[in-house]
Image (spheres, rainbow, N blue to C red):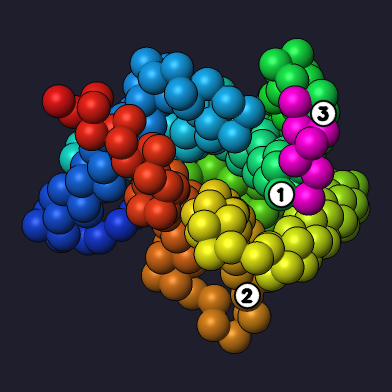
Amino acid sequence: MPNSSSVSEFLLLPFADTRELQLLHFALFLGIYLAALLGNGLILSAIACHHRLHTPMYFFLLNLALLDLDCISTTLPKAMAKALLDTRAISYQGCVAQVFFLVFFFSSEYSILITMAYDRYVAVCKPLHYGSLLGSRACAQMAAAAWASGFLYAVLHTANTFSLPLCRGNAVDQYFCEIPQILKLSCSDAYLREGRLLIFSACLTTVCFVFIVVSYVHIFRVVLRMPSDQGWHKAFSTCLPHLAVVSLFVSTVIFAHLKPPLISSASIDLVVSGLYSLAPPALNPLIYSMRNQELKDALRKLMH
């Protein structure tokens, strides 16, 4: 029975058995990756180059776009190489790094989404205090706290996961390394420690999601009392994209990790994991640019 000290590499789940389907997966992943790079790169460039977008809302959006690029770059290049070169192996150190960066970027992104909800709450419900509550120093501190919390969270989970003895081989039932799949390889009693930590993390995530929901309840109550349609349009054009991004992020992660065992299979797990790891980074730029006229104008000027 191998343990963690004797495992030098992991075997990831293959996409297909035939060469044609492997190349098709490579082309699909390449298209998604290029779309995510283009969309998030344009948002980063537009916010950096246009002084009208140097506001707290767009500062947090810049952090979100940067994290989306990091998230999709953690898993997709390795998946493309795996499909193109027809290989399943990933080194032990590479798997540890992939788990660490995936948890780091995803948890930091969730923290940024919470911060963006607070930004929209202050902008709509307390507009007279917006400058004092969300000054440049406060925004920098909140963004730094989001990245730092994600880093500490990733260190804790990665160290806890890979300190467990691995007694069930090295075949990971996923196209990238993730904590639930690594726990399946650990000894029957050893994974309970990390399981308790995951339950605590799930409870903390739920509390933060409730904070987002409560913030938007207050936002919609204020918006519905606005007398002018222009106020409605401005509030909804900045709030609805963020709400859509939060819904996409949370729903895909919840469905991936809490789906019923009856609908679980290797192919379904691949599709679901692709949803939560690929869909938000690729679709977030489109969601934010659809209803935001300021961002549309900045992107148009950037393209010209």
Three-letter code, disc 3: Leu
Give the residue displayed 75% in from the left and 14% down from the top. 137
Disc 2 element: loop
Query: Residue 70, image x and y in percent?
Result: 48, 29
Magenta range is 125-131
Whole-angstrom CA distance, mark 1 to mark 2, is 36 Å
Give the residue displayed 66% in from the left and 37% down from the top. 112
Give the residue displayed 80% in from the left and 61% down from the top. 218
Do the CB atoms of the residues marked 1 and 2 lie less than 8 Å apart?
no
Residue toward you, 218 or 249: 218
Residue 239: numbered disc? none
Query: Residue 147, image x and y in percent?
Result: 69, 25
Residue 124: numbered disc? 1
Dividing the picture into quarters, in which one does residue 36 lie? top left
Do the CB atoms of the residues marked 3 and 2 lie less than 8 Å apart?
no
- Report crowding for label 3: few under 14, some 14 to 19, many 20 or more residues within 10 A (C-alpha): some
Residue 122 higher or lower than 209, as above or below: above
Residue toward you, 242 or 144: 242
Disc 1 element: helix
Query: Residue 125, image x and y in percent?
Result: 78, 50
Horizontal side of 130 relative to 256 (left or right) equals right
Three-letter code, disc 2: Lys
Give the residue displayed 41% in from the left and 65% down from the top. 271
Residue 133: numbered disc? 3
Residue 105 higher or lower than 166, as above or below: above
Residue 259: numbered disc? 2
- Report crowding for label 2: few under 14, some 14 to 19, many 20 or more residues within 10 A (C-alpha): few
Can residue 257 be seen here? The reply is no
